Image (cartoon, rainbow, N blue to C red):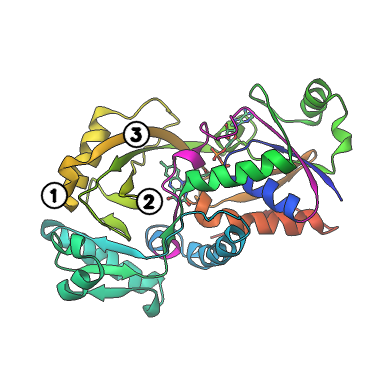
Amino acid sequence: MKRYLIIGSGLIGRLVAWRLIHAGHAVTILSSDDIAGTDSAGYVAASMIAPFTEAVCADKTIRSLGKQSQQLWSQWLAEFAQPVFYPQSGTLVVAHDSDKAELARYQRRAEYILQPADYQQLDRQQLTTLSPALAETFRSALYFPEEGCLDNRQFYQRVGEFLSQYADWQIIEPVMRLSATTLEQLCQQTLGHSVGKFTTVIDCRGNGSTADMEDLRGVRGEVLRVYAPEVDLQQCVRLLHPRHPLYLAPRPDHHYVIGATVIESADRSPVSVRSAMELLSALHSIHRGFAEARVVEMRAHCRPALADHLPTIRQQPWGYQVNGFYRHGYLLGPVMVNELMNQLLSTSASGGRYAS
Ligand SMILES: Cc1cc2nc3c(=O)[nH]c(=O)nc-3n(C[C@H](O)[C@H](O)[C@H](O)COP(=O)(O)OP(=O)(O)OC[C@H]3O[C@@H](n4cnc5c(N)ncnc54)[C@H](O)[C@@H]3O)c2cc1C
């Protein structure tokens, strides 16, 4: 059994800790966040697991890595005694008639990046069969059947309960810089022993690592959560628009996560009036039943991003940095955590990176 120290308890810190404990190792977590994880990007996220629709707008590597993560999510979530809401009902990509050029452009890119079996073109009749609510507004859609989204807060709760039981988890003041010296001080002050008691340290501070990773930046994202009892959408929906695209990720009992702005800024202040208006008006255009929806939450956070928007595992003299998940923490987290585990548990460990 090895002993690992994890700094940060958002999405990646939780995943790493969970899998290390599952593999029979001892884990200590030090984080400035609370046990619920409310300070983390992973708590705010829509948590869509969308390897195909994300690959269309990003890097084609995402398709194969995301598919591997999908399998890992299914395996790993099955370990919990209580289920985590994870509908895999697919994604419907739609555009209003005035924006049909956007849908045509999206389809051309899908043809270039994806395999023909990854998606289907639906006419109105097929859309009505799959999603009667959406067919009230749209005549056609592109359907990506093998996508889904999980309930991030339910997942945080389940994994939080597991870690509360099996990890030594302490809430600390934010750690601004990591080095052999600061880690030694931190361990002495917080744990009363040397950092040398750990096999290695894994930095999972997300945006909190910017002082140590000069190429890491925050990309602001704003999301709303609404309760819409008059609307019944089972699939994730992506509304294409030249200026204000929108996605919708279903949650249990007619709750939906609506997002998200993509703003080059590390500003984590509350959602702006402009963003709220744009998101809400796009939402209302999807289905008239959203007019009477209740806005239950508005949150902003930042996606920790590197220049190529792909995650990285970097080896440092004191341990590992696992970061740069940008808008793909849920999509690529499991596959990267598996890669980290391989590196940690092999003797010739070295930093790794998925290049585009
Ligand atoms: C609006 C929005 C929507 C998103 N939607 C999706 C989606 O649909 N699908 C998807 O795959 N991904 C999505 N993401 C991305 C995903 O949430 C992130 O990629 C992921 O959360 C990154 O995980 P992380 O653990 O690196 O960072 P975080 O989840 O932010 O966790 C970092 C943790 O470290 C702690 N910490 C920070 N600084 C310090 C410090 N100095 N000392 C100690 N602890 C510290 C924090 O409190 C936090 O608990 C979205 C993100 C946003 C913002």
- Residue 193 picture quarter: top right
Q: Residues within 10 Å of mark 1 (few under 14, many from 20)?
A: some
Label pair 3/2, CB-CB below 8 angstroms: no
Left or right of residue 112, residue 168 in this image: right
Q: Residue at x 49, y 50 (%)?
A: 309
Find the distance from the CA under tag 2 to the CA under tag 1. 20 Å
Q: Which residue is mark 1?
A: 288
Q: Does the beta carbon of the residue at mark 1 sit less than 8 Å from ligand 1?
A: no
Q: Position of residue 201 (x, y in %)?
A: 76, 40
Left or right of residue 199, residue 278 in this image: left
Q: Residues within 10 Å of mark 2 (few under 14, many from 20)?
A: few
Q: Position of residue 318 (x, y in %)?
A: 79, 38
Asked whether residue 13 appears in the rendered view, the answer is: no
- Residue 68 picture quarter: bottom right
Q: Residue at x 22, y 52 (%)?
A: 231
Left or right of residue 92, residue 48 in this image: right
Q: Nearer the viewer, residue 164 or 282?
A: 164
Earlier-in-chain disc, 2 versus 1: 2
Does residue 97 belong to the magenta stretch? no
Q: Which residue is mark 2?
A: 252
Q: Which residue is mark 3?
A: 297
Q: Position of residue 260 (x, y in %)?
A: 34, 43
Q: Residue at x 30, y 49 (%)?
A: 254
Left or right of residue 353, residue 153 in this image: left
SS class, disc 3: strand
Q: Which residues are magenta?
A: 23-52
Q: Residues within 10 Å of mark 3 (few under 14, many from 20)?
A: few
